Image (cartoon, rainbow, N blue to C red):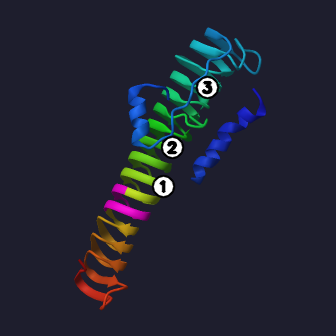
Amino acid sequence: MNARHLLLPLAFATLAARGAGSDPAEAALARWVDRPEPYVRTEGKTVHPVALGLFGDAQTGAPEDDVAGLRLGLATEHHNVGVFDLNLLYGYSGGFQRGFQLGSVNVVEGPLSGMQLGILVSVCGVLENSPSTGAQASLLVNYADGLDGVQLGLAFNRNGVGSGLQLGLVANFSDRFRGVQLAAINMDGDDIRGAQLGLINAGAKEFRGLQLGAINGCAGEQHGLQVGLLNTAGAMNGVQFGLINMATTSRGWQIGLYNDVQHAAGVQIGLANWASDAEFPLLPFFRSSF
């Protein structure tokens, strides 16, 4: 095991803090989230039905070999691995992983088809165009560049382009996601469709669905419902319900104590309603700009 592999989990933890095959079901999910073509799987040099290992070269087979059935060890490295993988310290797969992987730190560079259970960190799908299907559960960080399934983490979950459920105690991060995100903080970068439930839900350039939290934000177009103390959006095309509602443009409903919009083409119901481009910018109780 070289130093690069030892440092890899820490690198993914830092990324998380910042913010599969030809199966028809996988292909349908890939189209649903607008993914590129799936990862092309390669075979290892030699196939071993069972592999055992301690550290470095003290293992069955070479890192470029496949393990088809069972892998047990302290820290092992192979190419493709399945069906049961247990490493007390560190398990690394340079290709794809099938079945169940259990260890302190789990790293699969290609797609995962199964489940990773990590005491500390689980990583999958970091190679280009390698979407995974299944589940990740870890105490610290779950990281996937593309996972259709479930991420359960006591700290952070990071899913680049995926679908399903993200459940984290501290924060969930994603670029393009379809499904449900539940954490204290849900931060996203591109296109989110589904539901975000947390104290802070923010960052998406486009959001379609439900945001329920103390602070909800959408940097671009918001289609759906925001419910919170403070709701903000770029182009709001749904409903904002909260104490303070703010949007650049509105083609929906703002319902709250104070509603603020620059370009109004909807309804405002609140104690004070502000529309920058209106003839009377400030109105109490009600404004209709259709």
Q: Tell me residue 275's x, y (percent).
A: 34, 83
Q: Which residue is mark 1?
A: 190
Amino acid type, mark 1? Asp
Residue at (29, 76) in percent of width and height: 265
Amino acid type, mark 2? Asn
Which numbered marker is on residue 95? 3
Residue at (49, 34) in percent of width and height: 137
Q: Nearer the viewer, residue 237 or 138?
A: 237
Which of the two labelled residues, at mark 1 and mark 3, occupies the earlier sequence position?
A: 3
Which numbered marker is on residue 218? none
First to last magenta residue range: 208-225
Mark 2 and mark 1: span between their CA atoms?
Answer: 12 Å
Q: Quadrant of the N terminus?
A: top right
| Marks 2, 1: nearer the viewer | 1
Q: Nearer the viewer, residue 103 or 30?
A: 30
Q: Mark 1: which secondary structure?
A: strand
